[in-house]
Amino acid sequence: MSPETLLKEPNVQAEASPFSSESFDSYVMTTYGRFAIALERGLGCRVWDTEGREYLDFVAGIATCTLGHAHPAMIAAVTQQIQTLHHVSNLYYIPVQGELAKWLVDHSCADKAFFCNSGAEANEAAIKLARKYAHEKLNISNPTIITAVASFHGRTLATITATGQPKYQKGFSPLVPGFHYVPYNDISAIESAIEELDKDERQVAAIMLEALQGEGGVRPGDLAYFQRIREICDEKGILLILDEVQVGMGRSGKYWGYENLGIEPDIFTSAKGLGGGIPIGAMLCKSFCDVFEPGSHASTFGGNPFACAVALCVCQTLERENLLENVQQRGEQLKAGLNKLAAAYPHLIAEVRGWGLIVGMELQADVELTSADIVKSAIAAGVLLVPAGPKVLRFVPPLIVTAAEVDRALEAVESAIVSLGNTLA
């Protein structure tokens, strides 16, 4: 059958069998603790499960569905690119990859981009770049990268080692050498670590931090902390790497989290929201530390035409529809609403914090209520939320979220708090 005939054949699909979680679990490895709903379609900030129930999505694939679900611009980009060219090797020039790289460079402090498939891979590329730079430019034989306690950088062996949370590392030793952990937002800890590590022989090649710790409890970086780190890196020739996987691509109310801190990194990473739900990651850097050359690093799928076309569409839509303004306005609305709840229920809620549309609500440490409890109660009320640890509830809706949708989410959270709070009384 010719390709032309194939394109003209009708798309006939077999009728799907009713969803069964038992059947699912019999075939899929249990690497996730799943909530008991099965989602099958979405539109905007809403999703529907296999039973036809509607939910307001304030998870967005964990800060990933930048434009929500079934956005017309993404549908058009996907349709056009899959009919044109979906994958070729990086042995050849891929024009749309160059267009995406140009957009990212034009809208950031970076000079060059490397494309991969996920945040973990982007951080892996950053780690490799920092090590190669350390060997070739700094003459460091055993480079060390300083990272933060409670950080999260991915699930590969190198990135779980970079992640300063033992629970993610348990059972995977021996871990990758060359990492040292310090408390987040503690400048004296950074200074002491550098002094100790470099006491006999220079080791510190890079400092790798999140501009805002996502999995670590939605904890924004302190302005003075990051500005002093930038000074230290400049003084000592240390690379500053920022993990922007969760907070980048407009989620903070600016294109990049580092813009909230008044500094520029030497290397930063992006994924999640970059493709709006289509897998893509990027490691971006300034020219002076671009020591990769042919053979240094690679990715079969990284930067392929399909992923890059969709990511470019997300970038252009973010800019064209001025979504940063919506992020700022809806973020302020969300934080104001949550702070109102915190004032009404101080015995249950300790703090509200975050930037733009990545907001965390921390529960009091001495109450039995957990973030998962509230998530389950909110699901029953038709709103999807996500924990950021046992005591922090995370709000990361699509960047197109409306004022009415924010109000609905706040109502669901208050209802959950009242209901669960009464059981603790």
Image: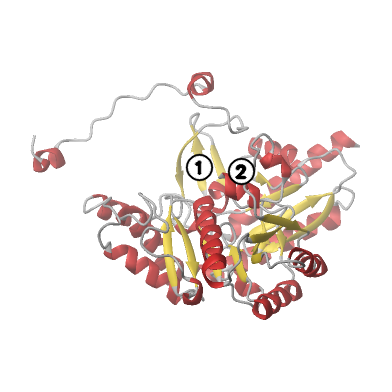
Image location (x, y in percent) of residue 186: 80, 66
Query: Residue at label 2?
Result: 384
- Residue 218: x %, y % from top left: 70, 56
**Relative side of 399 to 373, left or right:** left
Q: Residue at x 9, y 43 (%)?
A: 4
**Crowd band around label 2 with a 10 angstrom C-alpha radius: few (<14), some (14–19), many (20+):** many
Badge number at residue 173: none
Of the two numbered discs 1 and 2 on the same chain, state the one appearing first in sequence. 1
Q: Quadrant of the N terminus?
A: top left
Which amino acid type corresponds to the residue marked 1 in the rendered image? Val
Secondary structure of the residue carrying tag 2 is: strand
The front one of 296 and 38 is: 296
Which residue shows up at 86% across the image and 51% down it? 345
162 left or right, relative to 47 = right
Decide: is 52 above or below 86.
above
Q: Position of residue 145 (x, y in %)?
A: 65, 60
Query: Disc 1 designates what residue?
Result: 47
Q: Nearer the viewer, residue 54 or 120?
A: 120
Q: Marks 1 and 2: CB-CB under 8 Å?
A: yes
- Give the colour scheme of this rendering: secondary structure
Q: If the image is split into quadrants, where does the C terminus sit?
A: top right
How many labels were placed on the picture? 2
The amino acid on which the numbered mark 2 sits, given as a three-letter code, is Leu
Position of 66 relative to 160 (above/below): below
**Tag 1 secondary structure:** strand
